[in-house]
Amino acid sequence: MSFSLYIAKRYLRSKSTNNAINFITYIAIAGIIIGSASLFVVLSGFAGLRDFTLEFTTVIDPDLKAEATIGKSFVLDSIQEKQLQDIQGIASFSKVIEERVISSFDDKKQPLIIKGVDANYNKVYVLDSILWKGSWLTDKTNQVVVGYGVSNSLNIGLLDYGKRITLLVPKPGKGQITSLNQAFNQIETVNVGVFTVNEQLDDSYIFSSLEAAQQLLSFNKNQITNIEFRLKKGANEDSIKTQIQSVLGDNITLKNTAQLNDALNKMLNTENLLVYLLLTLVSIILIFNVIGSIIMMILDKKKTLTTLYSIGATLKDIRRIFFIQGAAMTIIGSLIGLFLGYLVSLNQVYGPEYLKVYITQTLPYPLSIKLENMLIVFVTITVLGLIASKIASTRISKNMVKTG
């Protein structure tokens, strides 16, 4: 055991005869504990909020989505479809058409996004999890399933064959328009279900069969806007993307779930970073108590330091004593703080209902306990503590230990 470490351990175990110095030391350790505990709890809270948000956002997001690189649509012929079916890692895929339309119901009009899907769509997604009322649409019919918000805003009921939803899109072409029929393509549809995913989708989406969407948009039989893939568990995403790209060609862009929610991920990551930096700043203020505590210890041990210097200890050894003491305070405090933060987070996830913090009357605030957040907190607090200890220990000068 080195000389500096031995003396630092003795100083840590012994109390000062000055109660004020002991009190300052306790405050410094408490600051480290509070800083590390609060930082871990908040990071766990943001991790839980991120998982909670993405859980509802990605419920109808595919593992991979193929879109046209140029233009809005592309043609998938029967040969390409067969080649996609032969790719081992693909569990299922669905041909989809997405486009903006105008809906008209009972003299109310609203812009929507139609999503025409084929019969395989229920193999790509668990549709029962998003259906709020009614049933899913039947393939090759003019049935639709509307979002909860759309149902409320247009006052659309279920299976009301006397009141049909009219969907319209402008006709492509040139020349003078003399009637409404010349200006718009339109189809009459019947609502058979209401889905709910999140506010954005609920207020703007309407599902139809692929054939109905093709008819409305004057698409050819094999013309679609995207393909949505569900991969088998454990499948190699990069390998499958390469195989799909070789089948569909370079005119198609493939995106995974993270890329489809890129804007949301960036927003959540930015918020997480800003909160981390803010709490780190607070932790810096708390940890600077370590500097004050070590300086007070140095002044309290001034005569002892002169003795140590006289018997052969170097200035570097004496500085290392207080650096080790500050580092030990920081590490012990951060570990205690992490443990307390872990207990608080554990209670929020698994504890009794009456001890949890709630967003609403029935929804507890989501927390996600992750090892990476523990490491981030430990490294952050430890590095700040080491810097503070280094700053404080360098206050010891040769004149101080010579004239103690």
Image (cartoon, rainbow, N blue to C red):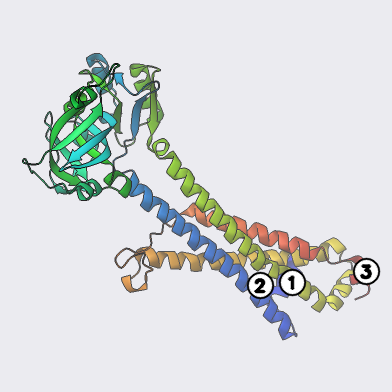
Judging from the image, what secondary structure is the residue with disc 3 in? helix
5 w.r.t. 152: above or below: below
Judging from the image, what secondary structure is the residue with disc 1 in? helix
Between 309 and 214, the one nearer to me in the picture:
214
Q: Residues within 10 Å of mark 2 (few under 14, many from 20)?
A: many
58 w.r.t. 226: above or below: below
Between 179 and 113, the one nearer to me in the picture:
179
In which quarter of the view is residue 286 placed? Answer: bottom right
Residue 28 is marked as 2
How far apart are the two marked residues, 3 and 2, measured between alpha carbons?
A: 27 Å
Query: Could you tell which of marks 2 and 1 lies nearer the N-terminus?
Result: 2
Q: Amino acid at mark 3?
A: Asn
Proximity of marks 2 and 1: CB atoms separated by less than 8 Å: yes
- Location of residue 384 in the rendering, given as x and y in whole percent from the top left corner: 67, 59
How far apart are the two marked residues, 1 and 3, measured between alpha carbons?
A: 20 Å
Question: Quick one: quadrant of the N terminus?
Answer: bottom right
Question: Is residue 175 at all visible to an observer of this figure?
Answer: yes
Q: Amino acid at mark 2?
A: Ala
- Location of residue 95 in the rendering, given as x and y in whole percent from the top left corner: 24, 27
Q: Nearer the viewer, mark 1 or mark 3?
A: 1
Question: Is residue 15 at all visible to an observer of this figure?
Answer: no
Q: Is residue 155 left or right of residue 268?
A: left
How far apart are the two marked residues, 2 and 1, measured between alpha carbons?
A: 8 Å
Query: Could you tell which of marks 3 and 2 lies nearer the N-terminus?
Result: 2
Q: Which residue is mark 1?
A: 292
Q: Residues within 10 Å of mark 1 (few under 14, many from 20)?
A: some
Between 315 and 37, the one nearer to me in the picture:
37
Q: Residue at x 23, y 20 (%)?
A: 219
Q: Is residue 216 left or right of residue 331?
A: left
Between 256 and 140, the one nearer to me in the picture:
140
Residue 399 is marked as 3
